[in-house]
Image (spheres, rainbow, N blue to C red):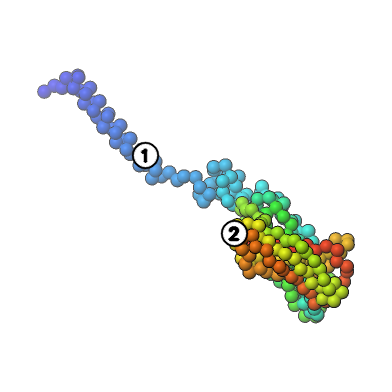
Amino acid sequence: MTMSPWAKRRRAMYGTGVMVFFLALAIPLVFFSIYEPASCFDGKKNQGETAPDLGGPCILLDPAFVQPIAVQWTRSFAVRDGFYNAISYVENNNKEAGVTNVRYIFKLYDARNILIAERTGETPIYPGKVFPIFEGRIDTGNRVPVRATFDFLTDKVWEKMLDPSRGIVVFNETIENRDTTPRVDAEVKNTTLESYRNVVLIATVFDANGNAINASRTIISRIDPTESLPVAFTWPAAFSEKVTRVDIVPLVLP
C-alpha cells in the first residue's frame, strides 16, 4: 500500500516532534551533568577574579594587589639580668586586607653581632593599622643584646578582613613609680555588642624623642559588651629615660 504524500508529511512532522521533545529533555540533563558553576575553588580565573580563585568575590586576595607590610622598628629591652623583652612595630596600610596567621622570628645579637637568642611565634596581620608584635622574657644567658631583628617566616595568605579590635578602646592612661618600679594603669572599654575573649594589650613607653624605652603585655580573658575594665603593666626596674608617652594597643584574634 502506497503512503500518500500527506501521510508522509504527517509522519515526518510526528518524528520531528518526538526528536525535538527528547532533545529538549536531553540537552539540560547533559548540560547540568557537565556544567560546574564558577566558584572560588575551581582553579580558574573567572567571575571578576584577578588571579585563579583570588580577588573579585573571593575572600582570598591576590598578593599582587596588596600593599607590602612595613616593619617600622624592632628593639629589645632588659627585664632583669639575662632576660629581655622584644617588640616590633608593623604597619599594614591595606584597609580591609589582613592575614589570619603568620609565623615570625625575633633574633637578638650582641656587640660582636653574634646571635645570642631567638624566639619564634605566630600572629595575625591586622588590617589598616600599625600594631606591635611582642615577645617577653627571652633568655639571653646573661649576654647583652645590642641589636634585634624581626622577620616573617612563612608566606602571607591575604584575605578580606576588618580589624577585629576596632571596637576596643583604651583611655585614662597613667604612669606611676617612674624612678623605682614603673607601673602604667589604664581603662579598657568594649564599645560593641559582642563579648571578646583573650584580648591582648601591649604597652610601649616612649621618651621625648619618640624612642621606645620599654614594653610590656597583659591579657584580658574576657570583656563583655559595653564593659570597662582596668588594666596594669609593670616593670621591675626604673626606665633609663623619662617617659613622655604611653602607647597601649589592643589586639583581638580575628
The residue at which mark 2 appears reads as 194
* Residue 115, numbered circle: none
156 w.r.t. 147: above or below: above
Q: Residue 115: which quarter of the image?
A: bottom right
Inspect the image, locate mark 1, and give the three-letter code of the amino acid beneath it.
Pro
- Amino acid, disc 2: Glu
Name the residue at the left extreme: 1
Q: Is residue 58 left or right of residue 14?
A: right
Residue at horizontal 79%, vertical 72%?
A: 183
Residue 139 relative to residue 3: left or right: right
Dot 1 corresponds to which residue?
Answer: 28
Question: Relative to 95, is 229 above or below?
Answer: below
Q: CA distance from mark 1 to mark 2?
A: 48 Å
Q: Nearer the viewer, residue 83 or 23?
A: 83
Residues 152 and 203: in front is 203
Please say whether residue 240 is visible from this viewpoint: yes
Q: Which residue shows up at 27% across the image and 29% down it?
A: 17
> Mark 1: which secondary structure?
helix
